[in-house]
Image (cartoon, rainbow, N blue to C red):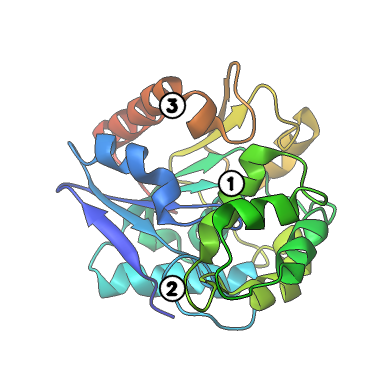
Amino acid sequence: MELKLVEAGTGPPVVLLHGLFGSARNFGSVQKQLAARYRVLATDLRNHGSSPHESGMSYDLQATDVLQTLRRYNAAPATLVGHSMGGKVAMYAALLSPESVARLAVCDIAPVAYPPQFHAYAQALQNLDLKPGLTRAAADEALAADISDPTLRAFLLQGLQLGASPHWRIGLAEIAAGLPEIAAWNPPPGSRFAGPTMFLTAERSAYVRSAHRPVIKALFPAAELVALRHAGHWLHVDQPGAFLAVLGAFLDRSAAEGSPGS
């Protein structure tokens, strides 16, 4: 599947991969800043944003989508920067095709399976009555009983198209069905990515733990782990300046040192 994307800037290609229920727009400010020095492609992953809807959310499928899109846009080898689910997609793509990835930045996620935790959100979105004339305020109020965090509700409602026939722009049914695949992690057997790699973790998040270090180093032997202070899981939103400083330094240093992918 060829993914939809937003492209900006010139220079070595950097591909931004968003998290679950997100879209390319989540990296808008990051893309704008990096585009001063890089060719930055912010993608909509399958069933998200403007990309096609299709069953299956396995990382093999998602990584293959990304690699196909890189080839279509003559952007390989590229630096992959992925947040959360997008970080898993980036890792899998680097393991599946090391020659297509110059370097890898993984944002607050580890190469491990996680307990299912998003079924309630998906069910709440599916239960929303998409009647004609629905307003964003009414949709927000309807979701409040099941999703108490107003910031999270606002984020999830970005995928709702209002108007005469309200509908979800995201492939909500496909995402809901694919949640077990999204929580899982089954890397290609015997794979590893030896290129420059950074795991950028969030101080106030439990997604990446010290117990994950051995599996990280086994799959990504050149990996460095950097913790971003005063940041939660949405580290590029909580600490945008620090996030860009750390990511920019990694990109510039890796480019200067050279980027072997395997």
Q: Is residue 118 left or right of residue 70?
A: right
Picture disc at residue 51:
2
Q: Position of residue 89 (x, y in %)?
A: 55, 59
Quadrant of res 226: top right
Which residue sits at x=44%, y=20%? 242
Q: Which residue, as the protein is rendered here, is positioned at the far left? A: 10
Q: Is residue 138 above or below residue 230?
A: below
Of 129 and 257, the residue lying toward us: 129
Q: Position of residue 32 (x, y in %)?
A: 26, 40
Picture disc at residue 240:
3
Secondary element at tag 3:
helix
- Do callouts 2 and 1 mark residues in contact (Cβ within 8 Å)? no
- Do callouts 2 and 3 mark residues in contact (Cβ within 8 Å)? no
Q: Is residue 90 above or below residue 48?
A: above
Number of callouts: 3
Q: Earlier in the sequence, mark 2 or mark 3?
A: 2
Question: Which amino acid, by three-letter code, is at mark 2?
Answer: Ser
Residue picked out by circle 1: 154
Q: Quadrant of the N terminus?
A: bottom left
Indicate which label's residue lies in the foreground, 3 or 1: 1
- Do callouts 3 and 1 mark residues in contact (Cβ within 8 Å)? no
Which residue sits at x=72%, y=67%? 128
Question: Which amino acid, by three-letter code, is at mark 1?
Answer: Ala
